[in-house]
Image (cartoon, grey):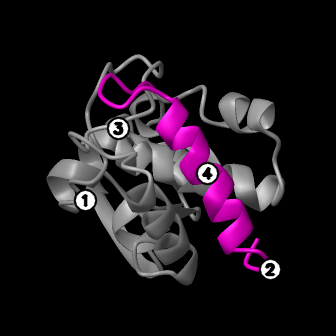
Amino acid sequence: MNNTIKFILDGKNVEYNGNPSERLLDVLRNYFHSTGVKCGCKEGECGACSVLIDGVLANSCMLTVGRIENCEVMTIEGFSKTKKFDVIDKAYSSVGAVQCGFCIPGMVLATEYLLSQNPNPTEEEIRDGISGNLCRCTGYNAIVRAVGIAAKEGEGLW
């Protein structure tokens, strides 16, 4: 059974004509070619498929596309066009917090969500804020430093 599901993707009104029980992750990657949304564990544990839905961080592997009707979905592709992304990107780059890049889209969106909720987080709050994302390359210390730098450099954006 196919339906037309309307939502906003990275600031644009879009429609998906298909099965509403398809995983949002698959629809974003295969139908809308949002390849920054990574397919990791498919169990909501690694955060590689993170997106912002109405400003809230969510694992797209755990949602069906039918559940996002009329919602606003922000992927890393859309977020990368913002001033906030520029601040986060520079902070991550400044401390070498990016290696393979598989987890980084989810980490960046987790950073955005954390800073939008708490513009001046402590180290413990940063570690808690990114805890839904797994990184096997850099470890977490560089990423925690990057989030702290982004909070300081982006003062007033969040």
Q: CA distance from mark 1 to mark 2?
A: 29 Å
Amino acid at dot 1: Ser
Badge 2 vs badge 3, beta-carbon distance below 8 Å: no
Q: CA distance from mark 3 to mark 1?
A: 15 Å
Q: Which residue is mark 3?
A: 103
Mark nearest the camera among 1 and 2 is: 2
Mark nearest the camera among 2 and 3 is: 2
Magenta stretch holds residue 138: yes
- Residue drawn at x 31%, y 61% as measured from the top left: 16
Q: Which residue is mark 1?
A: 34
Tell me the magenta residue range. Answer: 134-158
Query: Can residue 30 be seen at all in this image of the molecule?
Result: yes
Badge 4 vs badge 1, beta-carbon distance below 8 Å: no
Q: Which residue is mark 4?
A: 147
Above-or-below relation of 7 to 19: below
Which numbered marker is on residue 156?
Answer: 2
SS at badge 4: helix
**Which of marks 2 and 1 precedes in the sequence?**
1
Characterize the local packing of mark 1: few (<14), some (14-19) or many (20 or more) Cα atoms within 10 angstroms. some
Residue 158 located left or right of residue 142: right
27 and 91: which is toward the camera: 91
SS at badge 1: loop
SS at badge 3: loop
